[in-house]
Image (spheres, coloured by chain):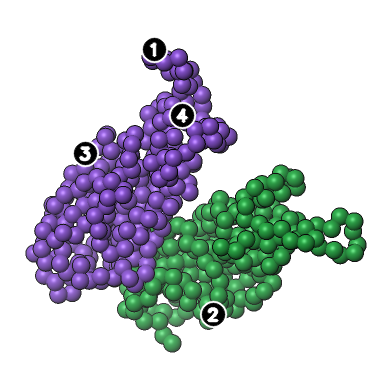
Chain colours: A green, B purple
Amino acid sequence: MAFEPELYIPNLSYDSVIFGFSGEKLKILVLEYHNTGTFALPGGFVRKDEPLEDAVKRGLSERTGLDEIYLEQFHTFGSMDRFRPDIMRKILAEQGHILEDHWMLGRFITIGYYALINYENVTPKPDELSDSIEWYDFDQLPELMMDHHEIVRKALEHLRTHLDHKLLSFNLLPEMFTMKDLQQVYEAILGEPQNRANFQRKMLSLGILERHEKLYTGGSHKAPFLYSFKKS
Amino acid sequence: MAFEPELYIPNLSYDSVIFGFSGEKLKILVLEYHNTGTFALPGGFVRKDEPLEDAVKRGLSERTGLDEIYLEQFHTFGSMDRFRPDIMRKILAEQGHILEDHWMLGRFITIGYYALINYENVTPKPDELSDSIEWYDFDQLPELMMDHHEIVRKALEHLRTHLDHKLLSFNLLPEMFTMKDLQQVYEAILGEPQNRANFQRKMLSLGILERHEKLYTGGSHKAPFLYSFKKS
């Protein structure tokens, strides 16, 4: 289906930072445009008759194949530095578009969203505009276009600041987990080791965890407690 | 100067929630449109060649007469519920505009900003579109148009969550203040009394305050310490 610009709000886009974690390293989902060497966050546009949140879910599903993902809005980016028609010209030319007065050559203000998912549970699929969509280690990202590094930085800052109260929404951990599982998530996202005793004390003081029976594996004398997030 | 719609990004606006505090109650700045009984937050539009942050400062200055105010972006609102051409028609008709295909009858996504200022230091001035611009007690707001109550609610939620680290940016207190001054700010914004000892303990534990000499008034045996925010 051809893209019909008159159906969309001009000069406005969204971009999503999809953080992935699976017990070890923090990763980010990055797409590459066909034959341009241009790497970008998955993003899209809002139809004139469509709620913003629906547009973001629809776009993420179309571009990455990911559905049912909880996305958190964190910031809207509106500087003029992000106006880079030269980069858009290259991508559009590769896609065979007529460049004169093309809708996407305008200036865009973009609304940033992020998510945190277990990347082992999902298989991203690129759409037809994209060469590939891949998980990259957070510390080995390719060069991203325009201000997308700044968008990633601000998303991570937001995630770090609000992790205590957002982790439940992101549904990253299994129903029951150990304090060590939780500590691994924090270490990956905060980017630094946590002291085990201090971490446990802080987590328990937040009042967000419910303690269950111990996890008996048979192999150890120190069976760890299992926890879940409190409902509500 | 006539408004020239072709210079502005269509379908996109911003709205600002200006909280005012002066030692006692929390207030909000609300404007009323001429002869319509319609109350609204001060807002505006972004020029196609203008950085978002500049647009917000320019608009606030034009509509309210307030300059040099630190504004914090908190959320972008994009539901279809906020599309209310009936309300805009009434305002535009009163302003003598031709209604057919008017730019402002479209659907708008709005970017929310808030500020916290000492309302004794400023005198808001309405622009020519507005009847009045007044401080209203937070618990006695008039009925605001569209989703402006929701915008206020979300701004207050953000301010409450981030007060410990935003208060310095808002430059609300004098250079030197007592713990009681600080407690009054928190009580007005959180909307509930704080226990004096707990409040002091929490504030000191944040590591954001510097303690100075005592404030000797001559009238009391219990001279309170003076504090300032730490530079950084």
Q: Residue A161: where, in percent of width, then height?
A: 56, 50
Specify whether disc 4 shares its chain with disc 2.
no
Q: Which residue is mark 3?
A: B123
- Image mark 2: chain: A
Query: What distance separates the C-alpha of mark 4 from that of mark 3?
Result: 28 Å
- Image mark 4: chain: B
- Give the residue at x 49% y 74%: A57
Specify whether disc 3 shares its chain with disc 2.
no
Which label's residue is closer to the chain start, 3 or 1? 3
Mark 3: which amino acid? Answer: Thr
Q: Quadrant of residue B96?
A: bottom left
Give the structural element (helix, strand or loop) at label 3: loop
Which label's residue is closer to the chain start, 1 or 4? 4
Q: Which residue is mark 1?
A: B218
Q: Quadrant of residue A19?
A: bottom right
Numbered circle sitting on residue B179: 4
Q: Nearer the viewer, mark 4 or mark 3?
A: 4
Q: Which residue is mark 2?
A: A127
Q: Residue B92: where, in percent of width, then height?
A: 14, 65
Q: Is residue A163 above or below residue B180?
A: below
Q: As rendered, which of B200 and B11 lies closer to the eye?
A: B200
Mark 2: which amino acid? Answer: Asp
- Give the residue at x 69% y 72%: A120
Mark 1: which amino acid? Answer: Gly
Query: What distance separates the C-alpha of mark 4 from that of mark 2?
Result: 57 Å
Give the structural element (helix, strand or loop) at label 4: helix
Q: Residue A35: where, in percent of width, then height?
A: 55, 74
